[in-house]
């Protein structure tokens, strides 16, 4: 893997919103946290669902929806089930998110979060989730599982605070598996799940992760390594930097494909300003000065370093690197 590929995803920690986070520190923290987070974004036991970075970006006429799963009680009864045909409902039409079979093992999931699937979807208000359970099994004290049922059943649930999707959105839904409620008797499982849209997070103990291949910024809780929210950012977002003048309220994001710096208001998760970078063939790297007034952009192909005023978008200087 090349150096540029390894640097394809960038994040900024907001563990202390008032602190100026050095770029080197942020890069090191990313590589400490990212393996844990990528594990949380995977379905269990080698299923066919793919990593977020391997899923193609939606076209401009569609939005994106990602689904994650966690347990209501990681120490609840041990059970396993196979699910397939994961779909979401909007405007009376069901849309497939992860049609392939996924095996859920509560003992394997534990306190982790699983990534179930992500897909471009039409605009709409997504308010229901369903899938088929094709097999269930109950954990035994000797570590084995007892198969209970192979009869397919449909699990369907409403979404608490439904998730509207409009142009440019990349949002997430979160499923919770209630193990205790799913155990109806000594040898009977009736799977119980709930679904919810994200709750807005307090600006602390958060990690922002850019996924350039799907034009998405994921918001990860650093205390649990769980995705808590997401929003879309067009233009292949790569490098992130906190605006130190706003106490964690704004984020500078390098949109590499558009050769621009986008300013995002984190309270609304919306772009409030865009500065196009002049005279660059490729925007390979960005960092922001400690006072938050200037951005430095590296064009590695032509070996130029540019300095941009992030208040006006004016090019302040440009030097060639030998």
Image (spheres, rainbow, N blue to C red):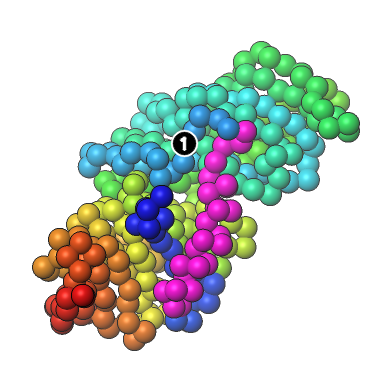
Q: Where is residue 255 in the image (x, y as percent from the top left)?
A: 26, 59
**Residue 117 visible:** yes
Query: Magenta span covers which residues?
Result: 21-45
Q: Between residues 206 and 200, which one lies in front from this camera angle?
A: 206
Seen as rendered, the residue at the extreme top is 151
User: In this rendering, is residue 61 above or below 207?
Assistant: above
Q: Between residues 280 and 292, which one lies in front from this camera angle?
A: 280
Seen as rendered, the residue at the extreme left is 279
User: In this rendering, is residue 201 above or below 244?
Assistant: above
**Residue 155 visible:** no
Local secondary structure at mark 1 = loop
Q: Position of residue 2 (x, y in %)?
A: 37, 53
Q: Position of residue 237 (x, y in %)?
A: 31, 57
Q: Name the residue under label 1.
A: 50
The crowd level at tag 1 (other Cα within 10 Å; few <14, some 14-19, many 20+) is some
Q: Who's the residue at 62% across and 44% down the image?
A: 70
Q: Who's the residue at 85% across and 29% down the image?
A: 140
Q: Position of residue 277 (x, y in %)?
A: 16, 68
Q: Who's the residue at 71% across and 23% down the image?
A: 136
């Amino acid at each position: 893997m090349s150096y540029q590929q390894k640097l394809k995803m960038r994040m900024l920690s907001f563990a202390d919103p008032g602190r100026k986070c050095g770029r080197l520190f942020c890069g090191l923290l990313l590589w400490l946290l990212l393996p844990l987070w990528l594990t949380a974004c995977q379905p269990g036991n080698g299923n066919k669902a793919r990593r977020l970075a391997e899923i193609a970006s939606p076209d401009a006429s569609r939005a994106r929806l990602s689904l994650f799963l966690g347990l209501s009680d990681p120490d609840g009864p041990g059970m396993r089930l196979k699910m397939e045909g994961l779909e979401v409902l909007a405007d009376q039409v069901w849309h497939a998110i992860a049609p392939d079979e996924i095996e859920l093992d509560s003992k394997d999931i534990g306190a982790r979060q699983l990534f179930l699937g992500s897909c471009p979807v039409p605009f709409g208000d997504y308010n229901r989730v369903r899938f088929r359970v094709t097999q269930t099994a109950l954990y035994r004290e000797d570590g084995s599982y007892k198969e209970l049922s192979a009869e397919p059943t449909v699990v369907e649930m409403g979404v608490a605070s439904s998730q509207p999707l409009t142009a440019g959105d990349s949002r997430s839904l979160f499923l919770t598996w209630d193990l205790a409620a799913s155990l109806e008797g000594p040898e009977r499982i009736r799977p119980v799940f709930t679904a919810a849209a994200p709750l807005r997070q307090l600006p602390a103990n958060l990690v922002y992760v850019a996924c350039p291949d799907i034009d998405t910024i994921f918001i990860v809780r650093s205390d649990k390594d769980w995705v808590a929210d997401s929003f879309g950012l067009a233009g292949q977002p790569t490098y992130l930097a906190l605006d130190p003048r706003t106490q964690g309220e704004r984020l500078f994001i390098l949109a590499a494909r558009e050769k621009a710096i986008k300013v995002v208001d984190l309270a609304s998760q919306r772009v409030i300003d865009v500065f196009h970078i002049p005279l660059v063939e490729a925007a390979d790297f960005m960092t922001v000065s400690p006072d938050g007034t200037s951005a430095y952009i590296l064009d590695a192909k032509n070996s130029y370093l540019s300095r941009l005023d992030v208040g006006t978008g004016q090019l302040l200087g440009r030097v060639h690197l030998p």
